[in-house]
Amino acid sequence: MRDCQKCGSSLEENATYCINCGTPLNKEKQYKSGNQDVVQSPEPQAPQKQPTRKNKILLVSGLITIILLIGIHFLFQNLFSTNRMIENFEQALIDGNVKTVASLLSYEDGDLEISETAVAGFVKFYQENPEAIDSTVSDLKKQLETLKHNSEQHHTTIDGMVYLKKEGSILFHDQYKLVVPSVHLEISTNYQGTVLFVNEVEVGKAKFDNSSREYGPFVPGIHTIKGTLKTDYVDLSAEREVLIDGKSKKVEVDLHLNGDEVTFDLGDYEGVATLFINGIEIDKNLVEDPTFGPVKIDGSVSFSIGAELPWGTVKTEEAPIDSQNINVEFLNEDVKNNMMKTIHTFNSERIMVRTSADGSKITTATEQLKNELISQAEQDRESNYVYTAKHFSTTFDLDSFNLEYKPVKDVWYAYASAKPVFLRDYYKKGQAANGLARVEEGYDYVLIYDEVQGKWLVDEESESENFNDKNAQILTVEEPIQLTSEWAK
């Protein structure tokens, strides 16, 4: 029986290890040396450790991790392949797939989100210009090669509607995105209140005439710019298609609405003239700016003008706008009636002066005209002529009325044509009378407004060649009185 060389414990005959200390045992090897058999015990070998459960788990986990990493590598290579992205982009342009294009594009300003509505014009451009798809895709692939060979460069030269931009890396794979330039539109229009639209979406309203404002950002492409102006007296619109090619950060668009403008001629009037359109007051002094528009000039819109005049506040009668140039007459029914009353009364009073040479009997003439009437009467008296007359009526040509302000004299003048009707006789004193004869002659009258007396006065009269009674009004004398020169007795 043997003993364990390590602990000295007794060993079984065929034992392979010590049951006490666990030392492994090898069978002795015998070999001869000379004439003696030599018995050699082999060197003890260290026991082999059996793998534990924990080590097995770690080994398996490591293998799984390696496999997953390899799988993720190929997955990311497939999912985030820039070439695959460009291919998808190309196909979306060919198909006109707005949704896919919107999902693939980004603004230069990363905070802005691109919607399907935003890229509609972008896709429209490529649909209308399919040859541009090939050139764009080719350019993107060239950009990709340039960026791959220059790790410090984040994007190539921006000179087009879309370009590649590096945005980082995942598992040692550089990531790129398709970027479109952020372009703004500076839209100008000629009328205040014009509502502006880009691709049917309202973006703003013009605050002033001939104003401009910047809107955006917008994706490059074909965009429809529209302006509308709708009021109670006009309905205008203008529309333009604009190509934004991405080469400029700002594109200017002139959206001119073709509307008629009206110029009101106020003559030499220097006060305040307020415009009314269809009875509604417009915040506009025509003396400072005599032009108004846009407005229809087909007669469907009416105007009137209010002004402070020496005889009071005047508002002209409503008249149709049927021309681009309108002469303003500050005439209304009150002014016309006062003018007719003055002229009609004058034709009665002139007989009183002519038959008496007394200027105090006339209240409707200026001093100049009054003196002329007195002079006629005095000549009759000196030459022994007798004047007898009776005034019956005065017919007015209503189309002849007019007003005019003369700033040099600071006087308002009024004009009208009328035809007074008289029965009269003119003969030498001491001779037989000729008998009363009916006299109807047209006269042009000039009146001035006397601010001191606060009324219209006849300043001149002359025979008229233009009197027309097609549009006329007649004033009659209720109780005509026949008067005769006082010196006839």
Image (cartoon, helix red, strand yellow):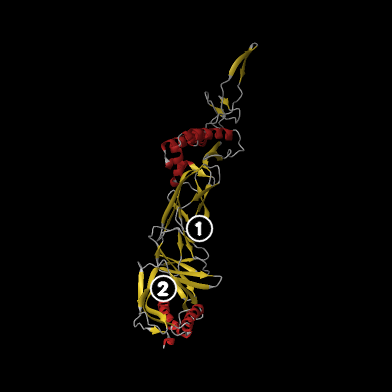
Which amino acid, mark 1? Asp
Q: Relative to 29, is 467 on the left or the right?
A: left
Q: Nearer the viewer, residue 342 or 282?
A: 342
Which amino acid, mark 2? Lys
* Numbered badge on residue 76: none
Residue at the outermost front position: 431
Circle 1 sits in a helix, a strand or a loop, which is it? loop
Residue at the outermost bottom position: 489
What percent of the width, then of the height, locates residue 61? 50, 36
Query: Mark 2 sits on what residue?
Result: 336
Which residue is at a point 41% across and 73% down the rendered structure image?
336
Which residue is at a point 52% across and 54% down the rendered structure image?
213
What percent of the width, then of the height, locates residue 249? 55, 46
What percent of the width, then of the height, locates residue 288? 53, 65
Q: Nearer the viewer, residue 148 or 244?
A: 244
Q: Picture quarter containing residue 92?
A: top left
Circle 2 sits in a helix, a strand or a loop, which is it? helix
Q: Picture quarter containing residue 294?
A: bottom left
Question: Which of the marked residues, 1 or 2, is nearer the chain's N terminus?
Answer: 1
Q: Relative to 435, is 161 on the left or the right?
A: right
Residue 348 seen anywhere in this rendered image of the structure: no
Near mark 1 (Cα within 10 A), the count class, few <14, some 14-19 or many ≥20, is few
Q: Nearer the viewer, residue 278 or 22?
A: 278
Up-down relation of residue 249 to residue 379 (above or below): above
Q: Picture quarter containing residue 324?
A: bottom left
Query: Mark 1 sits on what residue?
Result: 209
Residue 96 seen anywhere in this rendered image of the structure: yes
Up-down relation of residue 202 to residue 353 (above or below): above
Near mark 2 (Cα within 10 A), the count class, few <14, some 14-19 or many ≥20, is some
Residue at the outermost right position: 34
